[in-house]
Amino acid sequence: MDFTTKVPIAKSNNPINYDSKIVSLGSCFAENMGEKFQYFKFQITTNPFGIIFNPVSIEKLISRVVNNQKFTEEDIFFHNDLWHCFEVHSELSHPDKAEFLEKLNLIIQKSNNLIIQSTHIIITYGTSWVYRNKASKKVVANCHKVPQSQFDKEILSVTTIEASIQNTIDLICKVNPNCNFIFTVSPVRHIKDGFVENQRSKANLISALHNVVILSLPKCNYFPSYEILMDELRDYRFYAEDMLHPNQTAIDYIWIRFFENYITEENHATMEEVSSIQKALAHRPFNPNSDSHQKFLRNLNDKIIRLQKQFPHFQF
């Protein structure tokens, strides 16, 4: 007897392997998946501009990167002892104005090279709800704790999201026509917006994504992260203590469903080897000076060297 419903997932026609160069953008769930890729030593860069939740802000950053449009003093502001930019996450904010601009523009340059070289772009959308700055009339990626009175809150329509996703694809394809795209919707619940409002938000994202992806197969694929947590797992025991974010068990399960269908089977054995090395490196011996532990370390080092000969980018 089955006690869950399996979300059907079609295997990718353009699977990821250890030669792939991946850029992952989007919500905090993109960070969760990025950590998994890094653990297994795939070549991935995750959220160079920090966590970004909505499609319009992701599109804006992609446009900057593709067109090498530098940040200027007009794009930043001083608040609570730090310089901020409404287009990026607060983790990049900085007390020094010149250093902040230099850091932002260095990320633009590096991200441009990453997108040109990438084989796969993974984008995780978190919400359709956005905040529009009243002064500039622009949607912001992060409010940086600026008073809410300076923003209008609105929900992006399916049509607006669809256009934003298509623009994002077109921008990237302009500099990298062979790139493959994987889109997903974050399973994190944005309850601060309200229970009904969260469902509306996810529905708009899903509707827009399917409208775009269906027309762009096989270059674009939709991975059902949100649906796996809602339908396959479907229990609060798979949430963290805040009851909003998936816990580690849920993240591990969604990752398994991902790599079974989106990572080439030829690399699964190597992933197991990498995992065994990672677990061995995390091992804390009772007696680090014992002969048995020294032998263990030599064997482990031999395994690492052997893998690095096959995959020079592996760093443990």
Image (cartoon, helix red, strand yellow):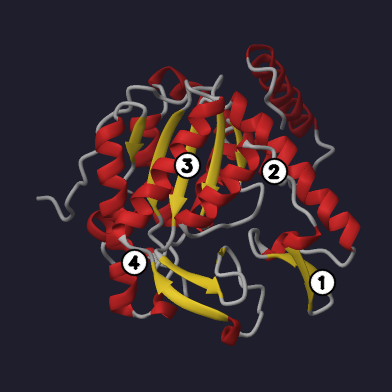
In percent of the image, x 44 and y 79: which residue is there?
A: 192
Numbered tag placed on residue 69 in the rendering: 2
For mark 1, does the 10 Å Cα neighbourhood hold few (<14), some (14 to 19), or many (20 or more) residues? some
* Badge 3 vs badge 2, beta-carbon distance below 8 Å: no
Q: Which mark is residue 201?
A: 4
- The picture quadrant where one finds residue 73 is bottom right
Q: Residue at x 46, y 77 (%)?
A: 153
Q: Which mark is residue 168?
A: 3
Q: Are marks 1 and 2 in contact (CB under 8 Å)?
A: no
Residue ID for mark 1: 82
Q: In what element is the residue under mark 2?
A: loop
**Comparing labels 3 and 2, the label whose residue is closer to the camera:** 2
Amino acid marked by disc 1: Leu
- Closest to the observer, 102 or 163: 163
Query: Disc 1 to disc 4, how far (Cα)?
Result: 31 Å
Q: Which amino acid type is shown beneath numbered disc 2? A: Gln
Identify the mark nearer the N-term, 2 or 4.
2
**The residue under label 3 is which amino acid type?**
Thr
Sequence-wise first label, 4 or 3: 3
Which-is-in-front pick, marks 2 and 4?
2
Picture layout, residue 235 above or below residue 290: below
Q: Residue 22 location, x and y as percent?
A: 55, 32
Q: Nearer the viewer, mark 3 or mark 1?
A: 3
Residue at 76 percent of width and 62 percent of height: 74
Q: Residues within 10 Å of mark 2 (few under 14, many from 20)?
A: some
Mark pair 4, 3: CA separation: 19 Å
Of the residues shown, which amino acid type is indicated by label 4? Ser
Q: CA distance from mark 3 to mark 2?
A: 15 Å
Local crowd size for mark 4, using a 10 Å CA cut-off: few (<14), some (14–19), many (≥20): many
In contact (CB < 8 Å): disc 4 and disc 3: no
- Percent across and percent down for residue 249 are 42, 56
